[in-house]
Image (cartoon, grey):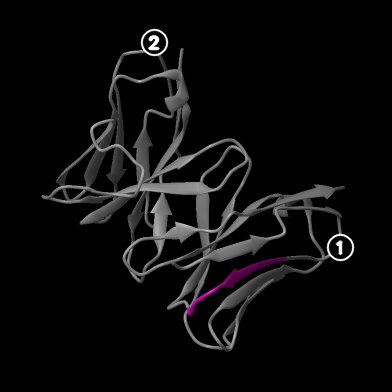
Amino acid sequence: GQQVMQIPQYQHVQEGEDFTTYCNSSTTLSNIQWYKQRPGGHPVFLIQLVKSGEVKKQKRLTFQFGEAKKNSSLHITATQTTDVGTYFCGWGAQKLVFGQGTRLTINP
Amino acid sequence: GAVVSQHPSRVICKSGTSVKIECRSLDFQATTMFWYRQFPKKSLMLMATSNEGSKATYEQGVEKDKFLINHASLTLSTLTVTSAHPEDSSFYICSAGGGQNIQYFGAGTRLSVL
């Protein structure tokens, strides 16, 4: 069956450093979405990628979908304390399934 | 964005009792809603797909008689944890589709079974 790995599981950075989380699938994905969950909160939709090689930016966040549509990444430039939380990739047309998540903590 | 309301936000109950959690789409209709369970510092595990007017579709390993789902209207799905036990303690979150595969999540319900 389809397997998607999200790495790293945890990432601790100094404020101002960059951060990247990756999702890698064993099979081609029709789409991939990214969500952010603040501590104690619920997941909030960030973006959806559907095209091969797609790159989208939201301020300091850059999202990529690989050419083969098997991997995706979320990169944050110059992290701020407000970026703290767990970032999940998700996929699926009929139902949304999540990756394991990457928990980002930041030293101010 | 779309708003999904989930109630209650927190519940503490005695072992053996049943607990009902409501999930409402406030400004849109949702023929499909989803129920997830999340353990501390873990990912969201999809439990079931709630289908308006028909039976829910459960994921493998999820007991349908334990977690009863009812989706009686286009804006309301309920999850009932029957005969709750301490191992059912968890964070339960619902979501509803707002179009283009985007899911909007409720605030979650933290269930503690004593």
Q: Residue at x 45, y 75 (%)?
A: A31
Q: Locate the N terminus of chain A and report the quarter of the image it occupies.
A: bottom left
* Circle 1 residues within 10 Å: few <14, some 14–19, many ≥20: some
Q: Chain of mark 1?
A: A
The kind of secondary structure element at disc 2 is loop
Could you say which is closer to the camera, residue A1 or residue B6? Answer: A1
Q: Chain of mark 2?
A: B
Part of the protein shown in magenta = A21-28
One can see residue B9 in this view: yes
One can see residue B1 in this view: no
Q: Residue at x 38, y 12 (%)?
A: B15
Amino acid identity at mark 2: Lys
Q: Which mark is residue B14?
A: 2
Amino acid identity at mark 1: Glu
Q: Which mark is residue A17?
A: 1
In the picture, residue B108 is in which quadrant?
top left
Q: Is residue A50 magenta?
A: no
